[in-house]
Each structure stands twice: as C-alpha cells, then as structure tokens.
C-alpha cells in the first residue's frame, strides 16, 4: 500500500515531533524507461547501472525504488531535537526490509526521505497532537484533504514517572493520497494499530510501576513545590527516549517490523470486486460487432435527421413506431438497426407482419405497404408511421390521401402474392437499394414540447462521422445504462413512498388507460399520512400536526416531491415519459 506510517510524539520541550517513519519504495525501472522514451537506450542503461551501483556501494541501502535527495543537507536543515524526539540518526535510513517477489523495499527512517512528503507528515503530526481531538483523547480519528493528504491518526499515551501528569502523548499516523482506500482499510488498520499500541502501553506501565515502587515520584514532586525553578525542572519534564520508557532497546526494530507488515498486509487485503449485480449485458444489447444489414449510423443517414429525431422520440417514451414498405429485407433491416437505442426489456419488435399487431405486443412493427392500420388505432394519436415509398410512384401530397390509398384490406394470400413481386436482393446491397425509396413520415401523434435529455446525446453520437460503429455501440450502451440506473432509483422511490394506486376515500380513480395526446401523463396522487416512509432521495411528502387538519398542517405537494426526485437523479419534467415507460417494462420483466 502506498502510504507512510509515522510515530509522532508531543515533546514537552519542542512540541509535536515526527519520531519514526516507515514507507515503501517500488521498483519502477521499467516504467522509467517507458517514460523516458526520448532518451537513448544507452543513456537509460547507464542510468540504471549507476543507480544500482550507488545502492551496492552504500551500506544498508535498499534494493528497489529511486530517491533523489541529499540526506546530509536535509539533516542540517532540521531543528536539533532531544532524545525524546529522535529514533536514530536521520542522515541515512534506519531499517530496511526488501520484498524480493514484489520488488518492494520498506524503509524506516527519522523523517520521510522526500522533502515534499516530509512537509505533509510534519503538518499531519502537528494536527494529530495539537488540533484534532477524538472523544476521550485516545483513539482513531480521520482528517485531511486532497492537497495535504488523508490521515488516519491514532492518539495514545504512555505512562512515565518523569513526564508532566505522568503521561507522554504519542500518535501513530497513516498518511496517503487515496481517501477511499484509507477509509475502506480503516477497520483493518485500526485493529492492528491497537495491538501495537497495547504492547507499548503494557511495557511502559511495567517500567512505570517498577520505578514508582522504588520511590513515590508524586510525593517527590509535592515536596519540591518550594524548590527553585531549576530543581523543579529536574524533577519533572525531562526528555526520555521511547526505548527507555518501554524498557526495550529493540523497540525501533519491532516498530519497523510491525509497520512493514501493516503496509504489506493492507495492500493485499483489499481487492476489487464486482458489486453492481447484473452485468451491463443483462440490460443492454451487445451490438458492437457489425452484422449483416444496416447499422444505426446507416439508418440515420437513410431516414434523415428530422425523421430520425421524431422516430427515436416516439420510441424512447413508449409510443409504437410502424415502418411500412414493400421490401421485407429493407424494413427488417431498419427495425433491427434501432435495437441499440433501447434497453433489452424495452425493445419488442415484430420485423415484418402480414397484419397489424397492437402496441401491447410490440412497440416497433414492420408491415407491408398494403397493410392498413385500424382507424381506432390511428385516432388515438399515439403511433408514428413511416412509409418507404418507391421513387416515381404517384402519391398525393397530403397525408390523408396517402392513408386513403392504404385503406383497402388485403388478405394474407393477396399480400403474399404482392410481396413475391418485390425484387429479391442481397443484404449487402440494402444501402444501395434503399436509395430507390423515399422515406415519408405519414402519421405522427403529438409529442411533448421537449424530448428527453438522452435523445440529444444519442443524436450527437450517431451523427458523429468520426466514431466507428464499434465505438458508437460502446457509447450508446454507456448512455443507455446511465439512464437505466436513473430508472432504478425512480422505481425504488415510488415503491418506498407507495404513491401508486393509493387515494383518499371517495376520490375518483383517474383513467390512465386512455392516451393523453402526447401530454405528460403523470397523475397527481395522494397518500394518507400513515403510509409515508422515509426516503434516502427525497424528503417526506407532508408533515401532519397532531391536532388534525388546519393552518398548522404543512403538506408538501406531489409536484414538489417529484421535482426533488428529478433533481436528485439529474432529470427534468421532460424525462418523465421515458422514466415511466422504462420503469413499466422493468417491473414487467422483474428486474
């Protein structure tokens, strides 16, 4: 784990001081060669050889990693410290452990071996022992930010007969740049820091009790109240090294081993794992491989930007889209190409049918040009009809005349006979053959004034000629899955609030089965107070006073609640038809 573990001490003479640090150095020689790509191979090889030679010539030098620092210069710039603030000479590393398989060196020293890291650890040390206080003064606490690093600090005290108050305050800090890694490692790190601290405190208590049994230092200090300042200073507050306090000469070596194990074990403990549940392929069709026929980019060019915009708008909000034409191959290819625009559970297509299929069975329907659509369906105004008309065929200009020409009803045999007259083509020539057809939007129900936000992103991606088809499919899958997650939140909040089909007694049940001519159909529903539950996304629907209905009653309207939910998931009022349509199909498929 890329972190620095430090032992800090609040010295009674010098204040907060960094006493001991353990950090990791990794072998990144291969990365350095790649990074220095403009340097010749000979210069890279010479640099590597010089570095290895410097390590070999220096006693107790580490094997892995690279440090550009002059320890002697740094040591001269440090403020002189007492024995309580010093572990060992900081002109060189104190202890080194090399992990051969991982090619990592763990180095313990007085201070971090890089100037920029020393500043971060020094600032964290001051905050740990002077500013940041946890309940009870002992225990773990987190503080930090992106600029100064993230810190887990565990503050504790060691008993000492020579200290003021008979206690000396210490802290062990874990400093790193990755906040989430640090917080996720919190239970593991705190558990093992407690063991290290407990061992130090036990040893210090034994020394304290032994020294106190020989002479009562508390009584000695009471007797020295009338002494001069010099004698009082000698009685209490004298600097004392950690090894003397715990009665163990090898305490620094033991701390080095403990900190090294903590760094290595913490890095091995956390592993990435999938927590999202079903993979993306469960909801989004994988169309990254070109198939026979048309792709979505070709269909966009064939339909044109205006017709494509209207068609996709109808699809996204759950309207039925009907494509009619004399060629089964072309109609089927166009319908198949639209599949990446919807989640799997929202794409219900009939590629080519001899008769009309209602919207409950499919939302994308392919028909022969001679098949008529029932007038009852046309009058509802919730469909979009696109006809592929052969060029040169005489068709009256108005949509009414076009629909009238299709009013005759053909039986299956007659339609099949006409279909056989259509020229047979190779699927690879579809794009060329379709140039002989004119695309006409012959019937369209009224749409909301603004489309869902997702439509603008889809059009921007599909109309971008710089994107390959494979890249486009990945882009569309990402967009669709982003909105699937919004729909999940939408469903969860609605289920938690139980606002569907819950009405006050005596109120009429709205008829939502009839089409509303494209208007935003989202009935204002009411819920009795006892059915309200708390939600992590939106606030409570209403606040009821014990006294009943009156001026003290404050009711949050359903419109306000809906606005809060939409804002939370990054949507607008114009996205509601899409959210409702996708949510309905989610629930039907038990996702």
Image: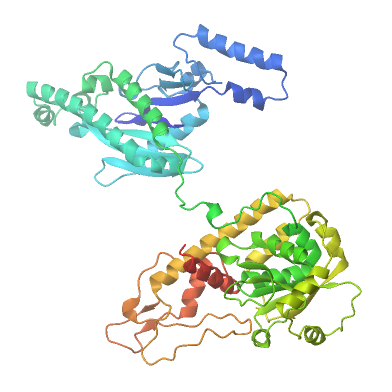
Q: Position of residue 449 (x, y in %)?
A: 67, 78
Q: Hey, which quadrant is residue 269 in on the image? A: top left
Residue found at x 26% / y 42%: 137
Q: Is residue 10 positioned above or below 373 on the image?
A: above
* Residue at the image position 22 percent from the left and 27 percent from the top: 199
Nearer to the camera, 251 or 293: 293
Return the x and y of residue 172 as percentages of the image width and height: 33, 33
Q: Residue at x 68, y 82 (%)?
A: 446
Q: Position of residue 468 (x, y in %)?
A: 74, 49
93 sits left or right of 331 in the view:
left
Whether residue 134 sits left or right of residue 467 in the image: it is left
Is 110 rendered above or below residue 566? Answer: above
Q: Is residue 579 above or below residue 430?
A: below
Say which of 335 and 153 sits in front: 335
From the viewer's perspective, tell me whether residue 543 is left or right of residue 168. right
Q: Relative to 529, does residue 226 appear above or below in the rendering?
A: above
Q: Is any part of residue 289 visible from this angle?
A: yes
Q: Is residue 471 left or right of residue 510?
A: right
Instruction: Spot the residue most to the right.
Output: 392
Question: To which quarter of the image does residue 217 belong?
Answer: top left
Q: Nearer the viewer, residue 45 or 166?
A: 45
* Count of numbered circles on the image: 0
Residue 539 appears in view = no
Residue at x-position 53% and y-position 18%: 70
Colour approach in the figure: rainbow
The picture quadrant where one finds residue 156 is top left
Across and down, in percent, residue 31 comes to: 61, 26
The image quadrant where one finds the N terminus is top left
């Amino acid at each position: 784990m890329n972190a620095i573990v430090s032992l800090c001490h609040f010295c009674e003479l010098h204040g907060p001081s960094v006493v001991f640090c353990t950090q990791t150095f990794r072998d990144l020689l291969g990365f350095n060669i790649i990074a220095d790509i403009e340097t010749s191979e000979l210069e890279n090889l010479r640099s590597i050889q010089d570095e290895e030679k410097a390590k070999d010539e220096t006693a107790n030098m580490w094997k892995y990693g690279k440090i550009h620092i002059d320890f002697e210069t740094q040591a001269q710039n440090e403020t002189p410290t007492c024995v309580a603030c010093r572990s060992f000479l900081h002109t060189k590393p104190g202890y080194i452990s090399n992990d051969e398989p991982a090619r990592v060196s763990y180095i313990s020293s007085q201070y971090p071996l890089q100037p920029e890291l020393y500043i971060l650890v020094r600032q964290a040390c001051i905050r740990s022992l002077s500013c940041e206080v946890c309940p009870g003064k002992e225990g773990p606490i987190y503080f930090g930010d992106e600029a100064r690093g993230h810190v887990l600090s565990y503050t504790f005290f060691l008993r000492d007969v020579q200290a003021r108050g008979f206690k000396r305050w210490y802290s062990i800090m874990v400093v790193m740049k990755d906040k989430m890694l640090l917080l996720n490692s919190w239970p593991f790190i705190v558990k093992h820091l407690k063991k290290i601290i407990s061992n130090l405190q036990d040893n210090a208590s034994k020394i304290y009790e032994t020294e106190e049994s020989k002479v009562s230092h508390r009584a000695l200090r009471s007797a020295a109240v009338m002494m001069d300042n010099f004698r009082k200073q000698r009685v209490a507050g004298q600097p004392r090294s950690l090894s003397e306090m715990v009665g163990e000469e090898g305490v620094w070596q033991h701390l080095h081993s403990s900190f090294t194990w903590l760094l290595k074990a913490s890095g091995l403990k956390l592993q990435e794992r999938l927590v999202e549940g079903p993979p993306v392929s469960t909801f989004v069709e994988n169309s990254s491989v070109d198939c026979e026929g048309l792709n979505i980019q070709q269909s966009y060019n064939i339909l044109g930007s205006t017709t494509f915009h209207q068609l996709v708008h109808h699809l996204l909000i759950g309207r039925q889209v009907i494509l009619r034409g004399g060629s089964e191959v072309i109609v089927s290819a166009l319908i198949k190409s639209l599949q990446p625009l919807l989640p799997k559970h929202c794409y219900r297509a009939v590629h080519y049918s001899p008769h009309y299929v209602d919207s409950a069975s499919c939302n994308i329907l392919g028909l022969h040009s001679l098949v008529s659509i029932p007038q009852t369906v046309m009058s509802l105004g919730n469909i979009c009809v696109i006809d592929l008309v052969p060029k040169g065929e005489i068709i009256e200009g108005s949509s009414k005349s076009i629909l009238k020409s299709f009013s005759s009803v053909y039986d299956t045999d007659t339609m099949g006979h006409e279909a056989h007259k259509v020229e047979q083509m190779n699927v690879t020539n579809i794009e060329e053959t379709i140039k002989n057809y004119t695309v006409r939007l012959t019937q369209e129900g009224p749409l909301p004034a603004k489309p869902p936000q997702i439509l603008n992103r889809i059009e921007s991606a599909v109309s971008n000629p710089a994107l390959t088809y494979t890249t486009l499919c990945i882009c569309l899958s990402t967009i669709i899955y982003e909105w699937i997650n919004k729909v999940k939140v939408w469903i969860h909040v609605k289920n938690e609030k139980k606002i569907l089909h819950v009405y006050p007694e005596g109120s009429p049940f709205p008829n939502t089965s009839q089409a509303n001519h494209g208007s935003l159909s989202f009935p204002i529903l009411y819920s009795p107070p006892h059915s309200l539950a708390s939600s992590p996304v939106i606030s409570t629907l209403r606040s009821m006073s014990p006294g009943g209905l009156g001026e003290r009653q404050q009711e949050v309207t359903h419109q306000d609640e809906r606005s809060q939910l939409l804002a939370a998931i990054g949507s607008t009022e114009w996205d509601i038809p899409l959210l409702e349509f996708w949510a309905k199909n989610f629930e039907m498929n038990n996702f």
